[in-house]
Image: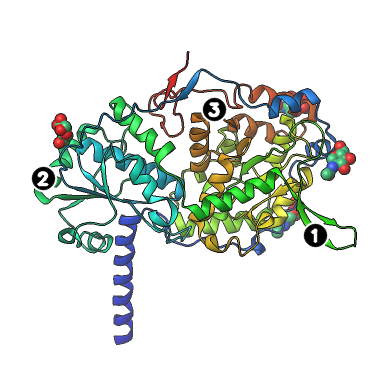
């Protein structure tokens, strides 16, 4: 009985801790595990007829040339603020602290919004705190990922920023807020709150206490009805102020250079082997160029989407188990059948499917592909189909030694930062599912008028369900469905994010 009691008490406090953790950090609690035994059939092709044709497909010269040609000027250029008129910042109304959930790209948006809110409130911003995401497990801080000097310097005429709170506020920490209800914590900011919400609800906290800690903070600032100077400040943070730390940039730079000028093994006159970097000698289009493919196909994504990826019954059971363990039946998608999900375009494309799409778009088997990806559920078996279509497929591991990757080893956010860097320098970017990385790239590349393929998920979902589709019908359907989705500017509509659709807020019209 004693034992049982103690055991129960232990259990109760564990649950309380868990609840506190949940209320602070969002819904993810368990770490992602990869188990190959889940999936015995990952290497089985789902679209073997199309795949056979894709292997034999020869892209026309015209198609190739269209694909690799950079976008022409579309009439917009980045907005650049006029040089500072040297007016000093208004007196600070207090300190703003934010605690940011999510992966790197979600945190990035939170950082931009935090700067905007500091501006709205005339407050001093404490460098944002990046929560450790329970799935990604990376403990890197803002200063481990972003170049903080650059950040502060670019924004010095817009807001004041500090790296550390003054001693009198040193008590205001994550632990302080996680352990009890505190009057300096603002925890009720609505999703997409207006500027006046912050003036009405946060300004008084600053006035009373000199500090306000806002958490949760993801997606807590509206995109519509914002003063244009606030919108432009958000753009400036995202596209100008946030750059990665030097070691991420230099690893990214090395990867880009090796993608453009591959390293080959050669033998010199006396028979010694050596490595040299070559200018791409293959003829025609795409020489010295590469596509960055973002493939988020880890177990979380696969389980959360609730789609059937063809790994057979064992995979289905494993994903359902995982879904139950982590989200306890709160996954909306699991209320739909696989067919319904595909019709709505809610299923990420598998490596095989993205390969078929790329071939249908006109990429040939000499295309150099950079795989911007963390872990692929099903491992190499699942990637094999894509690799057969695109034998020149590279990733961080194939391009850089483990010494070169030492700084980012086991660091999901820093790895994502390297992928962000390389993807921003690719000639073409495409993502297998429209998540945070896709949106971040779409926005940033649109801002710089760089080519980004936006897969028409609903249409592709439908096409891939038709098991009798011929290759030529598939190609026609892809051509039709992807029309105007290859980098053509799409202006932001109400409610949409300026970080995904920076036109017109972040740019100005060119004459
Ligand atoms: C911020 O400072 C500006 C300029 O001094 C002032 O006009 C504005 O009312 C201030 N806003 C707040 C919320 O303090
Ligand atoms: C693999 O696929 C075959 C044929 O579709 C199926 O009968 C088998 O159950 C699958 N294996 C697993 C472990 O799901
Ligand atoms: C590319 O495909 C052609 C057939 O279309 C084949 O002859 C060639 O060997 C392939 N190249 C590579 C690198 O796989
Ligand atoms: C499936 O593809 C075939 C062959 O390309 C085509 O004739 C048929 O209309 C398609 N079916 C549907 C439902 O789209």
State which image quarter holds ligand 2.
Answer: bottom right
Q: Which residue is mark 3?
A: 449
Q: In which quadrant is the N terminus drawn?
A: bottom left
Q: CA distance from mark 2 to mark 1?
A: 67 Å
Colour logic? rainbow
Confirm or deny contact between disc 2 and disc 1 (CB under 8 A).
Answer: no
Q: Which mark is residue 207?
A: 2
Residue located farthest toward the front when viewing the structure as drawn: 269
Residue located farthest toward the left when viewing the structure as drawn: 208
Mark sitting earlier along the chain (3/2): 2
Residue at image x 29%, y 86%?
A: 2
Residue at image x 72%, y 42%?
A: 368
Task: Give above or below for 19 relative to 487.
Answer: below
Q: Is mark 3 within 8 Å of ligand 3?
A: no
Q: Secondary structure at mark 2?
A: helix
Residue at image x 57%, y 48%?
A: 296
Q: Which residue is mark 1?
A: 274
Question: Is residue 429 shown left or right of residue 124?
Answer: right
Mark sitting earlier along the chain (2/1): 2
Q: Residues within 10 Å of mark 1 (few under 14, many from 20)?
A: few
């Amino acid at each position: 009985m004693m034992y049982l009691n103690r055991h129960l008490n232990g259990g109760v406090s564990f649950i309380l801790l868990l609840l506190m953790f949940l209320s602070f950090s969002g819904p993810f609690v368990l770490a992602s595990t990869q188990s190959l035994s889940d999936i015995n059939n990952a290497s089985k092709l789902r679209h073997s007829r199309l795949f056979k044709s894709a292997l034999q497909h020869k892209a026309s010269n015209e198609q190739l040339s269209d694909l690799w040609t950079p976008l022409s000027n579309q009439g917009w250029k980045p907005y650049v603020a006029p040089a500072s008129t040297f007016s000093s910042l208004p007196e600070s109304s207090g300190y703003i602290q934010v605690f940011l959930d999510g992966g790197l790209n979600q945190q990035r948006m939170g950082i931009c919004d935090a700067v905007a809110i500091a501006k709205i409130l005339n407050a001093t911003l404490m460098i944002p705190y990046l929560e450790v995401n329970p799935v990604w497990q990376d403990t890197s801080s803002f200063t481990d990922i972003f170049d903080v000097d650059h950040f502060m310097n670019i924004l010095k005429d817009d807001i004041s920023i500090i790296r550390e709170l003054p001693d009198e506020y040193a008590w205001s920490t994550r632990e302080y807020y996680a352990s009890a209800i505190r009057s300096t914590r603002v925890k009720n900011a609505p999703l997409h709150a207006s500027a006046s919400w912050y003036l009405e609800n946060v300004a008084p906290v600053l006035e009373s206490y000199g500090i306000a800690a806002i958490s949760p903070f993801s997606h807590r600032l509206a995109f519509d009805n914002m003063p244009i100077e606030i919108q432009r400040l958000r753009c400036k943070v995202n596209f100008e102020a946030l750059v990665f730390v030097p070691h991420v940039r230099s690893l990214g730079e090395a990867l880009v250079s090796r993608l453009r000028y591959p390293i080959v093994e050669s033998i010199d006159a006396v028979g010694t082997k050596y490595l040299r970097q070559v200018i791409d000698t293959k003829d025609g289009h795409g020489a010295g160029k590469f596509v960055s493919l973002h493939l988020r196909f880890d177990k979380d994504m696969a389980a959360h989407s609730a789609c059937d990826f063809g790994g057979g019954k064992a995979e289905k059971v494993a994903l359902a188990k995982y879904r139950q363990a982590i989200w306890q039946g709160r996954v909306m998608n699991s209320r739909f059948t696989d067919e319904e999900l595909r019709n709505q375009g809610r299923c990420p494309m598998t490596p095989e499917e993205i390969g078929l799409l790329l071939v249908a778009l006109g990429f040939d088997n000499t295309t150099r592909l950079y795989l911007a990806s963390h872990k692929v559920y099903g491992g190499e078996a699942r990637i094999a189909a894509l690799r057969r279509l695109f034998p020149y497929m590279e990733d961080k591991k194939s391009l850089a030694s483990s010494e070169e990757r030492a700084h980012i080893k086991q660091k999901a956010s820093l790895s994502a930062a390297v992928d962000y860097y390389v993807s921003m320098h690719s000639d073409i970017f495409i993502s297998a599912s429209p998540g945070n990385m896709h949106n971040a790239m779409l926005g940033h590349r649109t801002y710089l008028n760089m080519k980004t393929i936006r897969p028409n998920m609903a249409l592709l979902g439908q096409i891939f369900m038709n098991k009798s589709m011929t290759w030529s019908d598939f190609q026609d359907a892809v051509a039709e469905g992807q029309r105007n989705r290859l980098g053509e500017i799409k202006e932001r509509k109400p409610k949409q994010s300026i970080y995904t659709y920076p036109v017109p807020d972040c740019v100005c019209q060119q004459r």
